Image: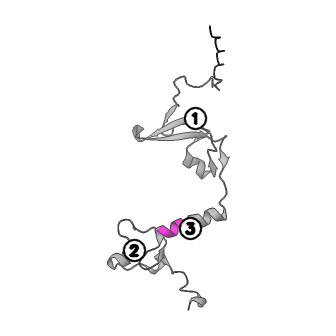
Amino acid sequence: MAAAEPASPPAVRDVDVYADPTGALPVYRWRQAPKGLATRRQLRERRLRPGGQDPVAVIECRGGKRKAWLYEIAKAKPIRPMTFAKELALDKAMAARQTCPTCSRRYYHCLPLKTLGSCLECYDGTPAAPGSYMRPPGEHLAAAA
């Protein structure tokens, strides 16, 4: 007769005794959430971020068609500062969306590159306002002449 293997101990779980047994988060209607809770966008306005915390509630907007997670403001952490490398990467990404591949002008707004493939001036001749774009690099430099 084989010896019975000892039973493994049950897994230890961290249980919140005050949590809803169904696991559902409380749902609040528009402008009915208690003080101390904020959405990601509201946290961002205060220069905060959730910081790894789980949402504690849900807010419904537009008759339940839209929902947003709510986080505790007290547990939120300050946003990380912009580093030079992040700023450089962001500028490079925006330059790709704002630069016309035909005329190499960089505009102050994003261009319809997926639909038109270029700026309006290159696409159909619509003149661009001189204040809506930057000069191409090197055009205004004395060394480029």
Which residue is label 2 attached to?
A: 119
Image quadrant in which the N terminus is located: top right
Dot 1 amino acid type: Val
| Residue at left offset 54%, top offset 81% | 137
Which residue is label 3 attached to?
A: 91
Dot 3 or dot 2: first in sequence order is 3
State the residue lying farthest toward the front. Answer: 1
Q: Is residue 94 magenta?
A: yes
Crowd band around label 3 with a 10 angstrom C-alpha radius: few (<14), some (14–19), many (20+): few
| Residue at left offset 49%, top offset 75% | 106
- Asked whether 138 or 108 is in front, the reply is 138
Q: Is residue 87 magenta?
A: no
Crowd band around label 1 with a 10 angstrom C-alpha radius: few (<14), some (14–19), many (20+): some
Where residue 57 appears, x then y in whole percent? 54, 35
For residue 53, what is the image quadrant?
top right
For residue 37, what is the image quadrant?
top right
Judging from the image, what secondary structure is the residue with disc 1 in? loop
| Residue at left offset 41%, top offset 37% | 64
Dot 2 amino acid type: Cys
Crowd band around label 2 with a 10 angstrom C-alpha radius: few (<14), some (14–19), many (20+): many
Label 3 and label 1: CA atoms lie apart by 35 Å
Residue 56: which disc?
Answer: 1
* Majority secondary structure of magenta residues: helix
| Residue at left offset 64%, top offset 19% | 10
Where residue 27 appears, x then y in whole percent? 50, 33
Q: Is residue 132 left or right of residue 85?
A: left
Q: Which residues are magenta?
A: 92-96
Q: Are marks 3 and 1 in contact (CB under 8 Å)?
A: no
- Asked whether 21 or 61 is in front, the reply is 21
